[in-house]
């Protein structure tokens, strides 16, 4: 059933009266705490009250140069890490994008109601085009159209994403409106739900956490490995010596990590100790490591168990693709009928 919500957006509710959620993650290899805080931890909050579809978006990952031989392992590792981090396949539909071909078919259909100028204005395209000047492919340009198909193929009205993806979700909503205006109301007007952890900077304190920049902390890394990265990580530049006071709000260790891993009493301890030079940066980082491990240790434990039983991950992905295809086939058929893409029955 579709109707307007309290904000006026056309919204879809399933037969159980639940709103559908969709979000995706690229199989880029190691899942880092930026992925966890900005996406996965946010996704877990939707599991009980929404009908959730979460996708390993391997088609999107092909817009950059990659080794095809590594892709299957990357997809598996991404699924394993997401399950270990809390995506219970009994509470959500977890699947691989390329196993549901309806995604790419709907993307073509959406391409016919999407204007070239709208895609050319996408900030993400401009940034990535600068980063890979020798590989500015058409897939990179139409990336947001496929993303809109990913979302709307399940009539998802809620899309938990990072701050950098909000523009794409706004475009997906406009694509839905353009389609509906031309062919009739088929798709909801999806809305972005941004995590509190909007933008997690890497250990360099300057750029968004990214494996390609080598500034990440993996969610499955051991405390020893994390400490080797955390100890030299950039902090407030005012604190050149222990006796120099600092400003926590200007320190990436506090703003990107402590705020999301540490309890209120430890945040107060850091604030007081930093502003009065009562603690050193290493003291601050050691307390952070302790709090990070309280969150990450259970994830590592679940991941180790899944590694010993890879068939559980594969079975979850198979079930997820089967359910996703049932929903996708129904919605695609509705869209094709609206567009007149069906044979006359005589």
Image (spheres, grey):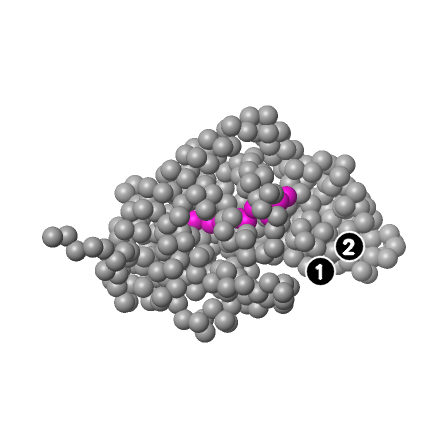
Q: Which mark is residue 191?
A: none
Q: Residues within 10 Å of mark 2 (few under 14, many from 20)?
A: some
Going from N to C along the chain, the mark reached first, 2 or 1, is 1
- Position in image of residue 337 (x %, y %): 24, 56
Q: Residue at x 69, y 38 (%)?
A: 221
> Residue 322 or 279: which is nearer the viewer?
322
- In the rendered image, which quarter is residue 48 located in? top left
Q: Is residue 205 above or below residue 228?
A: below
Q: Residue furthest bottom?
A: 117
Q: Is residue 338 magenta?
A: no
Q: Residues within 10 Å of mark 1 (few under 14, many from 20)?
A: few
Horizontal relation, residue 197 to residue 278: left or right: left
Q: Which residues are magenta?
A: 21-30
- Position in image of residue 59 (x %, y %): 49, 51
Q: Is residue 29 magenta?
A: yes
Q: Estimate the spatial distance between the alpha carbons at disc 2 and disc 1, rounded to whole Å.
A: 9 Å
> Residue 302 or 30: which is nearer the viewer?
30
Q: Residue furthest left?
A: 346
Q: Residue at x 86, y 57 (%)?
A: 240
Q: Is residue 134 above or below residue 63?
A: below
- In the rendered image, which quarter is residue 164 located in? bottom right
> Residue 272 or 95: which is nearer the viewer?
95
Q: Which residue is mark 1?
A: 206
Q: Secondary structure at mark 2?
A: loop
Q: Residue at x 28, y 67 (%)?
A: 181
Horizontal relation, residue 101 to residue 279: left or right: left
Q: Which residue is mark 2?
A: 234
- Position in image of residue 144 (x %, y %): 47, 61
Mark 2 touches mark 1? (CB < 8 Å): yes
- Tell me, yes or no, if residue 115 can be seen here: yes
Q: Residue at x 46, y 40 (%)?
A: 94
């Amino acid at each position: 059933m579709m109707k307007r919500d309290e904000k006026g957006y056309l919204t879809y509710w399933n037969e159980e009266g639940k709103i559908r959620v969709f979000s995706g993650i690229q199989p880029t290899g190691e899942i880092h705490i930026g992925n966890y805080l900005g996406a996965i931890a946010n996704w877990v909050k939707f599991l009980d009250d929404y009908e959730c579809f979460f996708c390993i978006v391997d088609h999107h990952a092909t817009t950059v140069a990659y080794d095809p031989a590594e892709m299957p392992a990357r997809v598996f590792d991404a699924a394993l890490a997401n399950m270990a981090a809390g995506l219970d396949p009994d509470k959500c539909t977890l699947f691989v994008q390329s196993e549901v071909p309806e995604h790419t078919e709907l993307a073509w259909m959406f391409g016919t109601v999407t204007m070239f100028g709208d895609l050319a204005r996408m900030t993400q395209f401009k940034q990535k085009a600068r980063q890979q000047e020798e590989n500015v492919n058409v897939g990179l340009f139409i990336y947001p159209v496929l993303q809109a198909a990913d979302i709307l193929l399940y009539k998802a009205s809620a899309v938990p994403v990072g701050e950098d993806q909000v523009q794409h979700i706004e475009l997906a909503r406009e694509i839905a409106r353009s389609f509906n205006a031309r062919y009739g109301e088929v798709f909801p007007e999806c809305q972005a739900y941004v995590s509190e952890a909007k933008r997690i900077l890497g250990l360099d304190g300057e750029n968004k956490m990214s494996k390609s920049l080598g500034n990440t902390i993996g969610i499955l890394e051991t405390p020893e490995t994390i400490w080797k990265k955390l100890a030299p990580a950039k902090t407030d530049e005012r604190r050149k010596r222990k006796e120099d006071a600092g400003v926590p709000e200007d320190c990436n260790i506090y703003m990107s990590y402590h705020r999301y891993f540490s309890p209120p009493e430890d945040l107060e301890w850091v604030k007081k100790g930093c502003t009065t030079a009562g603690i050193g940066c290493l003291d601050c980082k050691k307390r952070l490591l302790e709090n990070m491990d309280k969150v990450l240790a259970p994830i590592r434990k679940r991941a180790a168990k899944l590694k010993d039983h890879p068939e559980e991950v594969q079975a979850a992905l198979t079930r997820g693709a089967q359910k996703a295809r049932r929903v996708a086939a129904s919605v695609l058929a509705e869209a094709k009928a609206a567009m007149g893409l069906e044979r006359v029955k005589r």
